[in-house]
Image: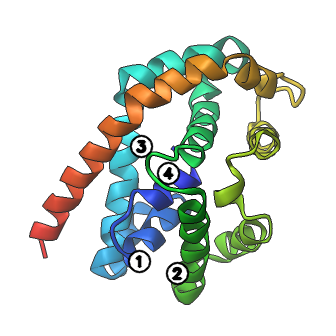
Amino acid sequence: MNFLAHSFLTFNDGQIVGQFLEDFIRNKDRYSFPKDIQDGITLHREIDTYTDSHPALHEAKKVFSPLVRLYSGAFVDVSMDYFLATDLSLNSLKGWKDHSLRVYKVLHKNERFLSENFKYMLTKMEQDNWLYNYRHDQNIKFSMRNVLNKAKYLDKDIPVFQAFLDNKDILQKCYDNFFPDLLAHVKAKNAQLQLQK
């Protein structure tokens, strides 16, 4: 899953920080953070592992795999944030906007834990309100272009965004079959983490 999902699948401020930190720290450093942040790191990893093994996401990868092969998972992650951002059964438009603003506020409040690379990205994320604006096609196009630009062995002109547009119905069905399972799984994992306090 991508940034919106990781920020949404949290249960306190520390977990928000940990969810974002996970991609920017070495494994051995995770235990240097407060318990709630460690829990967020754990949840991030749990989400990634569960996502990689879910049958609906295997189906979603088929949309992109003919174009990008092993990178298909990265484009599925971006796609799922689009469907999450437009899921009004989980949150209203105002609720998604409030969620986004809260996440930026929490991250700024905890800047002492963030790497310089992440702080730079956070500035851009907040300026363009990535979390809220994943609901728009153009923002998904931008995110997919970023993935292409970062991928060392992919041509930058691969029409992944067009594949997204052409297969929205399929990807929506994959999201519908997947996200409730992920949400239940993360809630159960968080309950386990709280028992460890």
Give the amino acid at mark 4. Ala
Q: Nearer the viewer, mark 3 or mark 1?
A: 1
CB atoms of marks 4 and 2 within 8 Å: no
Q: Secondary structure at mark 4?
A: helix
The quarter of the rendered structure image containing the C terminus is bottom left
Measure the C-alpha gap from mark 3 to mark 1. 20 Å
Question: 152 or 1, which lies in front?
Answer: 1
Measure the C-alpha gap from mark 4 to mark 3. 11 Å
Measure the C-alpha gap from mark 3 to mark 2. 22 Å
CB atoms of marks 4 and 3 within 8 Å: no
Q: Which residue is mark 3?
A: 48
Measure the C-alpha gap from mark 4 to mark 2. 16 Å
Label whose residue precedes the other's in the sequence (2 or 1)? 1
CB atoms of marks 3 and 2 within 8 Å: no
Whether 128 is drawn above or below 134: the answer is below
Please give the label number shown on residue 13: 1
CB atoms of marks 2 and 1 within 8 Å: yes
Give the amino acid at mark 1. Asp
Label whose residue precedes the other's in the sequence (4 or 1)? 4
CB atoms of marks 3 and 1 within 8 Å: no
Give the amino acid at mark 3. Asp
Label whose residue precedes the other's in the sequence (4 or 3)? 4
Disc 2 residue crowd, few under 14, some 14–19, many 20+, Cα 10 Å: some
Measure the C-alpha gap from mark 2 to mark 1. 6 Å
Q: Which residue is mark 4?
A: 5
Residue 62, by quadrant, is top right
Please indicate whether residue 77 sits to the left or right of residue 38 in the image: right
Q: Which residue is mark 2?
A: 106
Label whose residue precedes the other's in the sequence (3 or 2)? 3
